[in-house]
Amino acid sequence: MTRLSQRGVGRQEYLSVDPVSICPEGTDMLDPKLPTHRRGFLGALAAGATAYGLGGLIPRGLAAQPAPKATNVDDPKLDAWLSKINGKHKQVYDMPEFNKGVGFLWSRVFYMTNEGTGVPASDLSVVLILRHNALPLALTDGMWAKYKLGEKADLTDPKTKAPAVRNFFYKSQPADAPLPGMSIDALMADGALVGACNMAIKAVSMEVAKSTNMKADDIAEEIRSNLIPGVQVVPSGVWAVNRVQERGCTYCFAG
């Protein structure tokens, strides 16, 4: 089912993207300021890039591969984060969109049903990759209020019924979610790993900079400083989706 859903949904979504419109002629493809120890391609793009998947092509190699002995990542923190993926049953949820938070819901269900079938927690690894329009889910309430993320993303607070000025999937209240324990902090407390796309951070920063008297680099740094504790910045969401599959995770599209 994973193979079919990935080739059906994922491929359908991204074949419609025009690479020329994402990276027009004359665009500088290299951004030496990208703090990921890898060359990026978003540094010179305008905010219109956020309308696309930012390289969201799903890897064609769907079969889970044995975890490599080394992660071969230059960033020690990122290397340590990837090294936490272990156990017999490993799942990654790819979240490029909010989609009612189903990636969080399915992550909790994965824990619940494995526990119900006698699988110990030590045999499980859950990874959530928040990229593209799902990036705000990795941010604390202060960023939601300051930059009106709920209004910009058309997300309604389930409690106030108004545009959200808080991340209601962080430290959630009972009325915030359909299933207890599906908030991002509750999932991380059970060992889930959460990655935030640095390409999306840069794109959001450029969008905000257009309407404020601020520099995009300063906004990007502010966003990184206000990620939910425990969330790891990854070079790009699709980079992370690829790397965690190389370490044995099966893929689930949750966007």
Image (cartoon, helix red, strand yellow):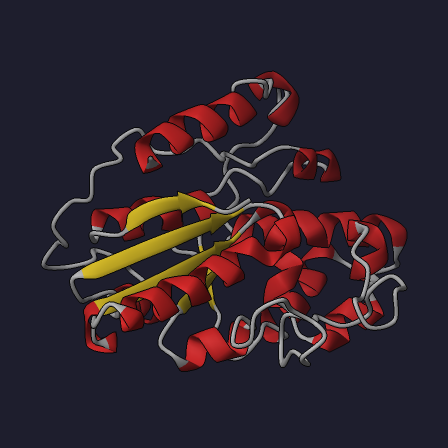
* Quarter that holds the C terminus: top right
Percent across and percent down for residue 223 are 65, 67
Percent across and percent down for residue 128 are 44, 59
Number of marks in picture: 0
For residue 60, what is the image quadrant? top left
Q: Is residue 65 above or below residue 35?
A: above
For the point 20% across and 44% down, the residue is 64
Q: Nearer the viewer, residue 81 or 112?
A: 112
Q: Is residue 40 above or below residue 167?
A: above
Q: Is residue 34 left or right of residue 215?
A: left
For the point 48% across and 43% down, the residue is 40
Percent across and percent down for residue 233 are 48, 63
* Quarter that holds the N terminus: top left
Q: Is residue 45 left or right of residue 251?
A: right
For residue 160, what is the image quadrant? bottom right
Percent across and percent down for residue 208 are 79, 54
